[in-house]
């Protein structure tokens, strides 16, 4: 009888082993499909584990007019403003490379209104419902999604030109000043134009440079070389503008003044002379942001 009493607990223990060792079944998140979309409010900061999120035929279909390289581990959100709003959903700080698509109404290829790598922005109309799909745009199946849903601010720019510049004996000139730029998430650049008259000869040149748009005051300088004639000591007319494009719109600031060029103490350093160039500003469409998918 003692042997039987010892055998029964051992048999029960063996029978319980398979149940204790069985792994828990993973389940996709509740917002894995549009029907489970989580409501967003402006100012929300969302952190979500998307490693169990999936992709399906709908993800592939709505990507037709966006061109993302992949739509893995997609999750869904929705937004219904009571007033017209300019909003941006930025998921670029996630632990994996993300993409965002925005739809006016139920998600279909034709209801896509914005998409981009890392973020997407739109003019949201009061009383309308918008769906956002956030996904992995690479072969990585999700991770820690870290996104913010905020106001899409217009860029803010200012620029000034110093009243003095220099002319180099080799023919180049340099002018300088200060600028301020913020909310230029798409791109920001400065362009400078210098004009000087030598008798009947009109000496002029343009240059263009990228700038930092981080909400701080910076110094700018431009060296210019005219394709006709050389700059010299004396008066000249300068014009500079700063252009910044945010998620939804572009802004520019311009400054003009007469500057006095003095002879420089030495020649311009190699690699600092900019050839004459021109550029026309074209505000980017909603579907184009700071970085681009190949082929988009």
Image: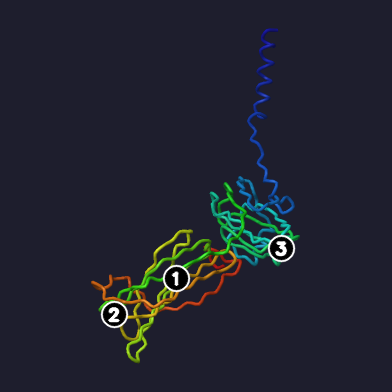
Q: Residue at x 54, y 64 (%)?
A: 155
Q: Position of residue 150 (x, y in %)?
A: 61, 55
Residue indicated by mark 3: 125
The answer, for residue 248, to whether it is visible in the render is yes
The label number, if any, that marks residue 168 in the structure image: none
Q: Position of residue 36 (x, y in %)?
A: 73, 50
Of the two numbered discs 2 and 3 on the same chain, state the one appearing first in sequence.
3
| Quarter that holds the N terminus | top right
Of the two numbered discs 2 and 1 on the same chain, state the one appearing first in sequence.
1
The label number, if any, that marks residue 233 in the structure image: 2
Which residue sits furthest top? 1
Vertical position of residue 89 compared to residue 46: above or below = below
The one nearer the camera, 89 or 291, is 89
Q: Position of residue 7 (x, y in %)?
A: 67, 15
**Is label 3 in a helix, a strand or a loop?**
loop
The one nearer the camera, 19 or 76, is 76
Dot 2 crowding, Cα within 10 Å, few <14, some 14–19, many 20+: some
Residue indicated by mark 1: 190
Which residue sits furthest right? 127
Q: Residue at x 67, y 39 (%)?
A: 25
Q: Is residue 186 left or right of residue 38?
A: left
The one nearer the camera, 137 or 279, is 279
Q: Are marks 2 and 3 in contact (CB under 8 Å)?
A: no
Q: Is residue 125 left or right of residue 46?
A: right
């Amino acid at each position: 009888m003692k042997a039987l009493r010892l055998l029964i607990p051992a048999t029960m223990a063996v029978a319980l082993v398979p149940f204790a060792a069985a792994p828990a079944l993973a389940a996709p998140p509740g917002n894995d499909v549009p029907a489970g979309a989580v409501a967003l409010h402006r100012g929300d900061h969302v952190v979500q584990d998307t490693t169990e999120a999936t992709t399906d035929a709908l993800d592939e279909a709505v990507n037709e007019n966006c061109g993302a390289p992949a739509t893995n581990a997609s999750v869904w959100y929705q937004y219904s403003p009571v007033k017209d709003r300019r909003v941006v959903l930025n998921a670029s700080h996630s632990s994996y490379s993300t993409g965002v698509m925005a739809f006016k109404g139920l998600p279909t290829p034709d209801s896509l209104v914005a998409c981009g790598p890392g973020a997407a922005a739109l003019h949201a109309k009061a009383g309308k419902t918008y769906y956002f799909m956030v996904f992995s745009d690479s072969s990585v199946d999700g991770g820690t999604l870290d996104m913010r849903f905020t106001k899409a601010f217009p860029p803010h720019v200012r620029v000034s030109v110093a009243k003095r510049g220099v002319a180099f004996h080799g023919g180049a000139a340099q002018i300088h000043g200060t600028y301020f730029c913020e909310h230029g998430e798409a791109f920001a650049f400065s362009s400078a134009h210098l004009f000087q008259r030598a008798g009947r000869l009109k000496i002029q040149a343009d240059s263009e440079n990228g700038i930092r748009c981080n909400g701080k005051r910076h110094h700018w300088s431009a060296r210019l070389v005219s394709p006709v004639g050389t700059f010299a000591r004396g008066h000249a007319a300068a014009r500079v503008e700063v252009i910044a494009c945010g998620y939804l719109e572009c802004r520019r600031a311009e400054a003009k003044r007469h500057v006095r060029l003095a002879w420089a103490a030495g020649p311009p350093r190699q690699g600092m002379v900019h050839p004459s160039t021109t550029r026309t500003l074209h505000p980017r469409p909603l579907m184009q942001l700071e970085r681009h998918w190949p082929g988009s």
